[in-house]
């Protein structure tokens, strides 16, 4: 048995690693399976096959492992899909560490294909797409080298360099064909089978707690991870939003920490109306990603109606109800890795009803901490003066804070009185310090106000708006008679959004852009998208409202381009088919090998049943036949002509056949004298 080609095994094992990684990126594969498969692949890449001596024993060991996994699934300790994916990884690892053979190689690649299917079901994220592409390329190259290797006689070198270029071209053609098949063949939406949420590769980065503790360095502002995706209607068509995404509000401050007086509701509902809506509401379809890490709903200010919520879990999507908390906060009842829901918000600048508030809640909007430094009230009075309008007073204080104080994330640990430290000592802080200072200073002057938390901004990526963890923000709501709560932000405008490194933000933005394209063009691609794609090639372009941008009796320019492309493709196909018909029925290499086999048969050396020329050459080499060296040369030239892109030169076939005939005649002469 010949030694298997090292490059082929390397490509095969790397394809298995890519297939397993397509499942591992979901974060749902257990650590024990992850460790075992990575160890097996590492040993295989090292060139060691420790299971080669005990193939049956190591295969039998998989049986109790399968039983243990089944029991874990039956006991509800393991998800069925995750269990199947983990076992497929173990099978692939066992085959990788076994002796290479055509059957083993096929089983390895089949297990890899099963793992790719498992990865598609578990996540289907952008990292899965990278793993899918890597598996497809590596597996195709490995299979191609296996075909070439099986055609080379024993002891002969495989023309790796010669065949890699045509193998690479064939692999690229196969990939293009697969993409064309995906685009044009009628299909269902991938999202019907894929699990939308997975824990991902990192922990949750933001979210809401029941309190806001003043102090700390505010490192969250430098985190570029995306926590929220939203589609808006009407779409503002803006690259960056200057909008507030509210999560909850706080009305009680003890000098260090903000809390909410209102008690949670015990009633769960599928749809909640917080306030009457205006005529023109802003519709939002929001998806909270696993990086968000909270059950609090987020919406553009000011939310009026929220509902149709789905919790995305590791086992699929399910409906979830909403529960009202204090401070206008809504929470999902069920835990999930992520959530999606619909919101209608009142447009900015619209007068809104603050809702029913009891006397205690109203009084709390003026409550001050017992330990408040008296200098805070004096400072507020000096800035506000005789102003009686709450909104004008808030705007005066906001402008003064932005002018006199600096924004910084470089703060030390907690201090006993963080507000006094911000106003009179450091004179620098982040958004929570600015919002707290404005809210408390307004209350010292008799203006009802509260602290609001959520996110600010939003970056357009494709047809969606992305909100990052670093966009987390705090601001002030001042209660204006006849208008309701109005947002006033004391934080300097340049520091309200994400404060991460520009290079890191650019890289993450690029990743999110590609991921959005992947989601829209692949994961969410359905039969309707296919029809829209075909219509878009022939219909005139349309504006955002759906109306044609231009009216003309002639077809649009894109229709002419499409027709030209189709015509060129048909012309090329006809040329290829005509060339094939004009070619001889058999290639030069095929005619050459047929002639060699005929000469051998006439000389009494016909191939045995099922033998190829390579097999005959290998058999004669084992028998030390005098024709073996020449036949090995003829076999090598045949393989080079057929697979190595080195065709037979003019007259070379006749010369080689003549040499073979001369050698055959020479080998028969001693026999003639003996007779």
Image: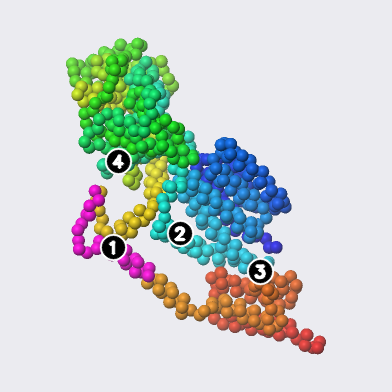
Indicate which disc, 1 or 2, sits on the residue closer to the N terminus.
2
The answer to whether residue 468 of the structure is visible from this angle is no
In the image, is residue 294 above or below residue 15? above
Measured from the top left, where is residue 466 in percent x and y?
A: 35, 40
Distance Cα–Cα, label 3 vs label 1? 54 Å
Residue 183 in view, yes or no? yes
Q: Are marks 1 and 2 in contact (CB under 8 Å)?
A: no
Quadrant of the rendering where the N terminus is positioned: bottom right
Q: Residues within 10 Å of mark 1 (few under 14, many from 20)?
A: some
Residue range corresponding to the magenta coloring: 545-570
Instruction: Choose the circle earlier in sequence order: 3 or 4.
Output: 3
**On the image, which quarter does residue 630 sit in?**
bottom right
Q: Is residue 47 above or below residue 468?
A: below
Secondary structure category for the residue under label 1: helix
Q: CA distance from mark 3 to mark 2?
A: 34 Å
Contact, CB < 8 Å: mark 3 with mark 1?
Answer: no
Q: Position of residue 386 (x, y in %)?
A: 18, 16
Task: Tell me the crowding category of disc 4: few under 14, some 14 to 19, or many 20 or more residues within 10 angstroms, Cα based.
Answer: some
Please tell me how crowded label 3 is: few (under 14), some (14-19), or many (20+) other residues with Cα within 10 Å.
Answer: many
- How crowded pointer 2 is (Cα within 10 Å; few <14, some 14-19, many 20+) is rated as few
Near-viewer residue (475 or 160): 475
Mark in the foreground, 3 or 4: 4
For marks 3 and 2, give the one nearer the viewer. Answer: 2
Residue where numbered disc 4 is placed: 232
Q: Residue at x 42, y 55 (%)?
A: 187
Q: Is residue 567 magenta?
A: yes
User: Which label was assigned to residue 178?
Assistant: 2
Residue that label 3 marks: 153
Spatial distance from mark 2 to mark 4, Cα to Cα? 34 Å
Label 1 close to label 4 by CB (< 8 Å)? no
């Amino acid at each position: 048995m010949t030694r298997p080609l090292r490059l082929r095994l390397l490509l095969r094992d790397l394809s298995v690693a890519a297939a397993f990684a397509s499942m591992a990126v979901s974060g749902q594969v257990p650590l024990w399976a992850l460790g075992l498969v990575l160890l097996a692949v590492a040993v295989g890449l090292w060139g060691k096959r420790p299971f080669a001596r005990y193939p049956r024993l190591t295969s039998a060991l998989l049986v109790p492992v399968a039983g243990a996994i089944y029991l874990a699934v039956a006991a509800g300790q393991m998800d069925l899909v995750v269990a199947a994916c983990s076992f497929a990884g173990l099978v692939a690892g066992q085959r990788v560490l076994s002796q290479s053979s055509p059957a083993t190689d096929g089983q390895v690649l089949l297990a890899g294909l099963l793992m790719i299917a498992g990865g598609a079901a578990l996540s289907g994220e952008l990292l899965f797409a990278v793993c899918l592409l890597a598996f497809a390329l590596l597996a195709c190259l490995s299979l191609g080298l296996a075909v070439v290797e099986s055609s080379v006689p024993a002891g002969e070198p495989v023309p790796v360099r010669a065949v890699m270029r045509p193998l690479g071209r064939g692999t690229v053609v196969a990939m293009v064909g697969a993409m064309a098949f995906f685009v044009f063949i009628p299909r269902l939406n991938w999202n019907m089978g894929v699990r939308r949420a997975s824990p991902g590769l990192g922990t949750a980065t933001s979210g809401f707690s029941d309190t806001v503790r003043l102090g700390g360095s505010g490192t969250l502002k430098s985190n570029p991870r995306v926590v929220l995706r939203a589609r808006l209607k009407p779409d503002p068509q803006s690259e960056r939003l200057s909008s507030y995404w509210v999560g909850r509000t706080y009305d009680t401050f003890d000098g260090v920490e903000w809390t909410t007086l209102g008690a949670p509701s015990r009633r769960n509902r599928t749809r909640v109306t917080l306030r009457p809506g205006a005529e023109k509401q802003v519709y939002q379809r929001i998806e909270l990603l696993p990086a968000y890490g909270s059950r609090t709903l987020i919406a553009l200010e000011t939310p009026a109606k929220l509902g149709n919520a789905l919790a995305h879990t590791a086992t699929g999507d399910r409906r979830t109800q909403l529960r009202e908390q204090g401070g206008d906060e809504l929470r999902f009842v069920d835990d999930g890795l992520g959530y999606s829901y619909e919101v209608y918000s009142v447009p900015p600048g619209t007068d809104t009803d603050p809702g029913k508030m009891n006397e205690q809640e109203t009084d709390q909007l003026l409550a001050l901490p017992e330990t408040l430094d008296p200098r805070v009230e004096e400072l507020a009075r000096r800035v506000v003066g005789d102003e009686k309008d709450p909104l004008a007073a808030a705007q005066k204080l906001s402008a003064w804070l932005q002018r006199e104080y600096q924004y910084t994330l470089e703060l030390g640990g907690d201090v006993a009185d963080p507000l006094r430290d911000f106003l009179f000592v450091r004179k620098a802080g982040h958004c929570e310090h600015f919002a707290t200072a404005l809210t408390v200073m307004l209350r010292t002057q008799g203006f009802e106000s509260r602290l609001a938390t959520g996110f600010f901004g939003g970056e357009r990526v494709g047809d969606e708006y992305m909100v990052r963890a670093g966009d987390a923000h705090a601001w002030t709501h001042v209660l204006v008679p006849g208008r309701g709560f109005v947002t006033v932000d004391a934080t300097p405008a340049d520091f309200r959004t994400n404060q991460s490194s520009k290079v890191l933000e650019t890289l993450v933005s690029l990743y999110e852009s590609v991921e959005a394209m992947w989601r829209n063009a692949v994961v969410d691609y359905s039969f309707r998208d296919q029809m829209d794609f075909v219509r878009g090639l022939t219909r005139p372009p349309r504006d955002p409202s759906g109306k044609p941008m231009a009216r003309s009796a002639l077809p649009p320019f894109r229709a002419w381009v499409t027709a030209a492309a189709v015509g060129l493709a048909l012309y090329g196909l006809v040329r290829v088919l005509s060339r094939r018909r004009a070619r001889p029925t058999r290639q030069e290499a095929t005619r050459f090998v047929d002639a060699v086999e005929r000469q051998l048969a006439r000389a009494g050396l016909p191939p045995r049943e099922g033998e190829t020329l390579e097999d005959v050459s290998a058999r004669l080499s084992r028998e030390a036949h005098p024709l073996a060296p020449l036949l090995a040369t003829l076999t090598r030239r045949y393989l080079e002509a057929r697979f190595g892109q080195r065709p037979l030169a003019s007259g070379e076939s006749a010369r080689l056949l003549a040499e073979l005939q001369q050698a055959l005649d020479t080998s028969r002469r001693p026999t003639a004298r003996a007779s």
